[in-house]
Amino acid sequence: MWVIKRSGEREEYDENKVKQALLRSGASEAEADEILEKLRGRVYNGITTHEIYQHVRRMLDRKRKIRYSLKDAIFSLGPEGHFFESLVARLFQETGYAVRVRECIRGRCIPHEIDILAERGSERYLVECKFHNSAGTRCGIQTALYTYARFLDISEVMPFASPWLVTNTKFSGDVITYARCIGMRLLGWRFPEDGGLESLLESHKLYPITILAIKKDVRNSLLTNGIITIKEIFTKKDRIYDILPELKANEVLYAARAVAECL
Amino acid sequence: MWVIKRSGEREEYDENKVKQALLRSGASEAEADEILEKLRGRVYNGITTHEIYQHVRRMLDRKRKIRYSLKDAIFSLGPEGHFFESLVARLFQETGYAVRVRECIRGRCIPHEIDILAERGSERYLVECKFHNSAGTRCGIQTALYTYARFLDISEVMPFASPWLVTNTKFSGDVITYARCIGMRLLGWRFPEDGGLESLLESHKLYPITILAIKKDVRNSLLTNGIITIKEIFTKKDRIYDILPELKANEVLYAARAVAECL
């Protein structure tokens, strides 16, 4: 049985992969097996991984649905990368950093637009975010190389502890080797294993608003007004009513509360 | 009157731009004015720059047609960049360098695939080629940054005089500033002004075979067999008859001779 991946490649259907994703979203062995059993009747030759994803999503309870949907919700922040940058900035804030987003800093040779500048006490980090629109794309070596060259150019004017590279997908093997060698920190999907992007977002309950079942135009109004996470829907409640008509603002708050109860 | 650029943008039709291109291809003032006069009846609101290009091309004599077509012929080496890399390698060879193309070299941290490694006496250069598929795309700062970081990583194992960055389009302003600052050499379309890629290719009579009016499959057979320039059609004549059926090989040689006579 073949499945078509997001990248367009096809591969043998692997129940174990689906099971791993289910277990990661918090389902028990028994629940996972039950879902796999139901799934068997719906999988057909040439099904897309996205279709499988949607079937599974429908069969999960609300709490698990949220964790299971996180990856997709982050893709929905695209197609450009700036909302992803804002999400990553919120994560740094949540862990005690003062952040500045998309600031222009003059290096020795040229000025650079820095995705995130994160400071905590005497630590100062330069964070480059690389957003990908599809799960198949790994963050490649050119990105790591230009991040480092940018870091070098700026470091001669303003000292930094080290460069960070944050992505919503995985890193290629040589990025990992290179980063270790030159002292660059990496954060990506399930990388590092003991605290990848998905696990940090989960532990800080930082879910992007794209996880809510709200209309696209409402979602875009919120994002462009700097409401990136569900938390902000509550902390910037007045702002929501400024941005949206009362009825829509109520709906957003209702949807956000329903999700927040599950977290 | 509006024209649509390759990038999809539209701009006011500017006769002077067409005239400059004509003069660059070697037409006299009088010839250029005559062509512009004829062109006036054919230009309409919303015409594409490519259509204008084709009209003009038809009105030029053979010698000028070749120079005028060089940019397009280089785009036709795509969509991937490796035939462009081979063309640039031929240019370095022609100026006395020993070249190695797409070689893997171990740096301090990771192995790198180097587009061109060019050596002449004690000079050794690392050449990164950046091929673009459309004239509107400028070679941007990320490319210059990763080229430099790659150069740094390799330099710690194998010393190089300096990195080169070669592209078939223009460079953005910050690439030029950055390159000057860190000592990177740049070669691009009409850059540097006193000897850009187009003028070096012309002065060494290094025209890519894509300038010939030959069928796509013939062209691809030649390119994949390492026949990149018209010169090579003559120097590797036997090879042409190995690659192609006699009739097609004859046609290629005939077309190449017709062009070579004009150079």
Image (cartoon, coloured by chain):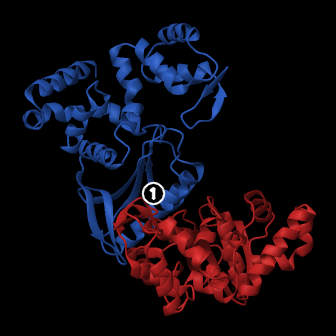
Chain colours: A red, B blue
Evaluate whether residue A14 shows in this view. Answer: yes
B85 displayed left or right of A24: left
Question: In the image shown, does A60 or A132 lie closer to the viewer?
Answer: A60
Label 1 sits on residue: B184
Q: Chain of mark 1?
A: B
Q: Quadrant of residue A168?
A: bottom right
Q: Position of residue B256 (x, y in %)?
A: 21, 24
Please say if A162 is above or below A109.
below
What number of labels is visible? 1
Residue A176 point in image, percent of width and height: 43, 79
Q: Quadrant of the N terminus of chain B?
A: top right
- A248, B126: nearer the viewer: A248
Q: Quadrant of residue A80?
A: bottom right
Secondary element under disc 1, as helix, strand or loop, is loop
At a point 59% along the width and 49% down the height, the residue shown is B173
Residue in view at x 55 percent, y 11 percent: B42
Q: Can you give x and y, in whole percent of width and height, for residue B154 in the image?
A: 35, 70
Q: Quadrant of residue B44?
A: top right
* Residue at left offset 45%, top offset 50%: B186
| Residue A183 visible from this viewpoint | no
Q: In the visual, does B78 lie left or right of B228?
A: right
Question: Which kind of residue does numbered mark 1 sit on?
Answer: Met
Q: Provide residue B25's location: percent of width, then percent of height.
A: 43, 22
Instruction: Classify residue A78 as left or right of residue B176.
Output: right
| Residue at horizontal 46 percent and vertical 84 percent from the top | A20
- Mark 1 residue crowding within 10 angstroms, few (<14) / some (14–19) / many (20+): many
Return the residue nearer the eye: B112 or A131.
Answer: A131
Q: Is residue A102 above or below residue B199?
A: below
* Quadrant of the rendering where the C terminus of chain B is positioned: top left
Q: Nearer the viewer, residue A126 or B6?
A: B6
